[in-house]
Amino acid sequence: MSHPDAYTAKVIAHIRSEFPTKFGLPRQSGLADTEARIVFTPPYRNPDALRGLEDFSHIWLIWEFSGALREDWSPTVRPPRLGGNRRMGVFATRSPFRPNALGLSAVRLEEIRLHTEEGPQLLVSGADLMDGTPIFDIKPYLPYADCLPDAVGGFTDKTAFSHLAVDFPAPLLERIPSEKREALKQVLAQDPRPAYQKDSRRVYGFAFAGAEIRFRVEGEKLYVLEVEPAGKD
């Protein structure tokens, strides 16, 4: 008999995105037009499970912070939005380091592909999930219930998002597939660096769409320095 306080969740799908690692991911869903595919695991590759979903513009994804799993947990964490210097209660944050490593993202449903070699797939935009992330559930976004205009954002209302001017030389930008360039520039403009790192001399890098993007930030401007095939030494 299972313990009454224990529950095993089934992985119904995985995300296929352009981000093989955590670094560079949008900080929240919907902040960049990053496209991704939701590929269902074999037991759930049933088109009937998606019947009616085409009438919704957005969906909720419930997923696992698979890149941040740990055995223990802490009641307080250091939110990046506060520069990593102040501790807040874990339940007042969206930190991945939680008793259950669950994430919640609202994404736009762009297309439903019912008949592919891997069964039904969902094409979404605005995703903030690392490639391969397990998904436990999908629910339709309901504007009348899920949109709360008078909601208060706690400490996040008092911390401004960074928005950098991006200097992306044309010859380097052309190494990125044309349909993915705008999403990459949106990710860069939001300043992918950890909030506590502000060294203008440091070169940062992350993988996106099969390429390694290297950049530095000086003041309010981000300079793309190199775009090389991912994995190149």
Image: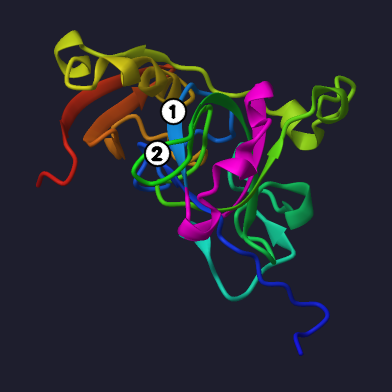
Could you tell me which secondary element the residue under label 2 belongs to? Answer: loop
In which quadrant of the rendered view does residue 3 lie?
bottom right
Mark with earlier residue (2, 1): 2
Decide if residue 135 is on the left or right side of residue 182: right
| C-beta proximity under 8 Å, tags 2 and 1 | yes
Q: Which residues are magenta?
A: 40-66
Q: Is residue 82 visible?
A: no
Mark-to-mark CA distance, 2 and 1: 7 Å
Query: Which residue is at 19% across, 9% downward?
Result: 170
Q: Point out the residue furthest to the left here.
A: 233
Query: Which residue is at 24% across, 20% downward?
Result: 177
User: Residue 17: which numbered mark, if any?
Assistant: 2
User: At label 1, which amino acid type do we have?
Assistant: Glu
Q: Is residue 135 visible?
A: yes
Decide if residue 206 is on the left or right side of residue 137: left
Query: Which residue is at 34% across, 43% downward?
Result: 117
Image spot of residue 205 (x, y percent): 29, 38
Q: Disc 1 marks which residue?
A: 35
Rendered view: 170 above or below 109: above
User: At label 2, which amino acid type do we have?
Assistant: Ser
Residue 42 painted magenta: yes
Decide if residue 192 is on the left or right side of residue 82: left
**Mark 2 crowdedness (10 Å alpha carbons): few <14, some 14-19, many ≥20:** many
Decide if residue 190 is on the left or right side of residue 52: left
**Mark 1 crowdedness (10 Å alpha carbons): few <14, some 14-19, many ≥20:** many
